[in-house]
Image (cartoon, rainbow, N blue to C red):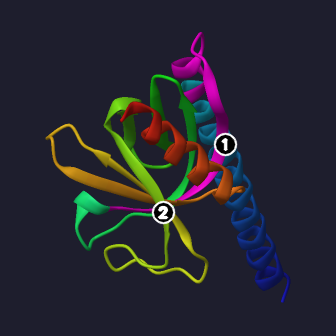
C-alpha cells in the first residue's frame, strides 16, 4: 500500500513540475519575442504599439496552418509580427500594405470570432494576407485602412 502511494505521489510531483516548467518556458519565450519586437520598433514613430495577439493564418501557407500567440506592432515604416513558439516573423513595409478587413474564414481557418485580415504584398511580389485577433480590431482596421489611403 505505501509503495503505491509513494509512486503516485512521485508521479504527481513530476507532473506538476513539468507543468510549472512549461508555463515558465512559455512566459520566458513571450518575454523574449516581446523584447525583439520592441527592439525592431525602437526609434521609429509608433502608430500602434506592440500588442499581444492571436495569430490565425497566413494566406500564402495554403490550407496547412499554424496558429498561436504572437506580438504585432505598426510603425510609420512597417508592420512587424512575430509568433511566440514558432519561427514565423513577418515584416511588411507600410508601402506594401494593401488594406484590412474583417473575415470569418481564411484558408480553412474559421474560429468562432471574426478575424482581422491584413492584406499586403509579400517578398515574392504576390498578394498575401494574415488573419489575427487583436483587442481592438476596429482600431487596427481603421488605422491600416487610413495608412493605405494616404499612400495612394
Q: Was residue 41 drawn as part of the magenta stretch in this picture?
A: yes
Res 101 label: 2
- Sequence-earlier tag: 2 or 1: 1
Q: In this orientation, which residue lies closer to the viewer: 152 or 122?
A: 152
In the rendered image, the quadrant that contains the N terminus is bottom right
Determine whether 61 is above or below 47 in the image.
below
Residue at image location 20% in from the left, 37% down from the top:
123
- Of helix, strand and loop, which one carries label 1? strand
Indicate left or right for 69 with 27 as reference: left
> Outermost residue, bottom direction?
1
Residue at image location 48% in from the left, 40% down from the top:
81
Q: Which residue is mark 1?
A: 51
Q: In this orientation, which residue lies closer to the viewer: 2 or 142?
A: 142
Indicate left or right for 121 with 113 as reference: left
| Residue 84 visible at all | no
Determine whether 82 is above or below 6 in the image.
above
Q: Is the residue marked by circle 2 packed among few (<14), some (14-19), or many (20+) residues within 10 Å? A: some
Q: CA distance from mark 2 to mark 1?
A: 18 Å
Residue 126, percent from left and from top: 16, 48
Res 114 label: none
Q: Was residue 1 drawn as part of the magenta stretch in this picture?
A: no
Amino acid at each position: 500500500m505505501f509503495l503505491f502511494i509513494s509512486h503516485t505521489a512521485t508521479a504527481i510531483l513530476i507532473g506538476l513540475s513539468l507543468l510549472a516548467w512549461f508555463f515558465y518556458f512559455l512566459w520566458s519565450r513571450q518575454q523574449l519575442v516581446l523584447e525583439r519586437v520592441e527592439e525592431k520598433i525602437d526609434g521609429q514613430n509608433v502608430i500602434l504599439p506592440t500588442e499581444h495577439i492571436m495569430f490565425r493564418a497566413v494566406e500564402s501557407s495554403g490550407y496547412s496552418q499554424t496558429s498561436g500567440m504572437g506580438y504585432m506592432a505598426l510603425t510609420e515604416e512597417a508592420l512587424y509580427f512575430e509568433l511566440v513558439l514558432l519561427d514565423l516573423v513577418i515584416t511588411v513595409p507600410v508601402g506594401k500594405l494593401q488594406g484590412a478587413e474583417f473575415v470569418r474564414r481564411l484558408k480553412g481557418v474559421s474560429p468562432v470570432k471574426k478575424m482581422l485580415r491584413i492584406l499586403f504584398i509579400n517578398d515574392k511580389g504576390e498578394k498575401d494576407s494574415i488573419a489575427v485577433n487583436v483587442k481592438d480590431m476596429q482600431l487596427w482596421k481603421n488605422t491600416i485602412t487610413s495608412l493605405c489611403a494616404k499612400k495612394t
